[in-house]
């Protein structure tokens, strides 16, 4: 199987031995509560950019669960580009996430920005999110090695795939092999979108690593109208799931309202996604080798 890999990737990733794909083709399955990420299921994580209030979070949790999401996202600690922007509710936000989990059964993914917060956030989160600005925060990555929770590692906005896997290797070497990679768009010269979704990152990462790969179309696009179509693209190229921003009233969101879907939009997106997931499923059965290898040269 390895011989089907593009020769350009030979040796480029194999030094990251704990996260690089082995010849036996086995893939990592990440157990989250009563389901797995990286198996056959396409797992959708959805919710607000930031936890703002109890009604905002609980209404969103109910709406995304009803539409088929398995995991609630929401930042309690927010890394903002501007020091004047809303910085998050901190521990109050974590308590609200816990309440939403109790009421809906959704698992929780939330961002950890500092190694000092790892233990506290691990008490509340089912998955620890490392944001794009923290991908190379090695003190944080090392602290996550012993947190006992899966880590959702977002690609740095100017990071190569090699650098992303290097950070994954740091987490794995620190003792935690439960890692989910996330393509969330990279910075390019294009300005029509907030970032440029590197859709090829999905099949490349799946060819060179055994870790699950998800796509965040919200931060990639920056505009809500593109989120459904980018989600379909993610499904077709074989992503293991999505991370999507949803808000009860995006125009009043304290952060990232422009790229957040409202509830009807999210419901529609989930419905429209199904034929694309079916397509990916059937093509995987028809041509398992080629897709598993991420395409021959
Ligand atoms: C987020 O998911 O809330 C976030 C801040 O994303 P990123 O780190 O990709 O900008
Ligand atoms: Mn956001």
Image (spheres, helix red, strand yellow):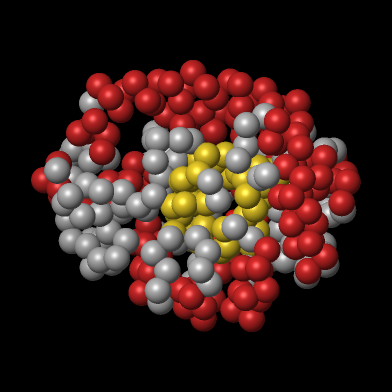
Question: Residue at (79%, 62%) from the top-left corner?
Answer: 95
Q: Residue furthest left?
A: 3
Q: Nearer the viewer, residue 153 or 204?
A: 153
Q: Quadrant of the N terminus?
A: top left
Quarter occupied by residue 88: bottom right
Q: Is residue 43 above or below residue 195?
A: above
Residue 90, image x and y in percent?
A: 78, 68
Question: Residue at (46%, 32%) from the top-left corner?
Answer: 235
Q: Nearer the viewer, residue 204 or 82?
A: 204
Residue 99, image x and y in percent?
A: 78, 53
Left or right of residue 90, residue 16 in this image: left
Name the quarter showing ligand 1: bottom right
Q: Is residue 41 above or below residue 51?
A: above
Quarter occupied by residue 176: bottom left
| Residue 297 visible here | yes
Q: Is residue 18 above or below residue 8?
A: below
| Residue 234 visible here | no
Q: Nearer the viewer, residue 107 or 295?
A: 107
Residue 29, image x and y in percent?
A: 39, 50
Question: Residue at (37%, 57%) from the top-left corner?
Answer: 161
Residue 17, image x and y in percent?
A: 25, 66
Question: Residue at (78%, 69%) from the top-left corner?
Answer: 91
């Amino acid at each position: 199987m390895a011989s089907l890999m593009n020769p350009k990737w030979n040796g480029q990733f194999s030094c990251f031995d704990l996260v690089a794909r082995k010849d036996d083709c086995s893939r990592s399955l990440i157990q989250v509560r009563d389901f797995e990420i990286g198996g056959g299921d396409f797992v959708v994580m959805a919710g607000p950019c930031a936890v703002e209030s109890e009604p905002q979070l609980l209404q969103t949790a109910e709406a995304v669960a009803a539409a088929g999401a398995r995991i609630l996202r929401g930042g309690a600690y927010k890394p903002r580009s501007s020091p004047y922007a809303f910085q998050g509710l901190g521990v109050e936000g974590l308590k609200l996430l816990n309440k939403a989990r109790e009421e809906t059964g959704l698992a929780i993914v939330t961002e950890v920005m500092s190694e000092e917060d790892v233990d506290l956030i691990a008490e509340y989160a089912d998955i620890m999110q490392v944001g794009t600005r923290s991908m190379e925060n090695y003190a944080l990555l090392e602290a996550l090695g012993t947190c006992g929770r899966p880590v959702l590692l977002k690609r740095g906005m100017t990071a190569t795939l090699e650098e992303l896997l290097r950070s994954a290797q740091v987490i794995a070497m620190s003792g935690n092999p439960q890692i989910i990679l996330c393509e969330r768009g990279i910075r390019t010269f294009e300005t029509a979108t907030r970032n440029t979704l590197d859709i090829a990152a999905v099949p490349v990462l799946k060819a060179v690593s055994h870790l699950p790969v998800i796509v965040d179309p919200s931060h990639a696009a920056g505009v809500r109208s593109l989120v459904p179509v980018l989600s379909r693209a993610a499904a077709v190229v074989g992503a293991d799931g999505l991370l999507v921003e949803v808000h009860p009233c995006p125009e009043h969101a304290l952060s990232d309202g422009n790229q957040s879907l409202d509830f009807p939009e999210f419901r529609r997106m989930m419905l429209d996604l199904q034929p694309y997931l079916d397509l990916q499923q059937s093509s995987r059965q028809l041509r398992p080798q080629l897709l598993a290898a991420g395409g021959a040269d």
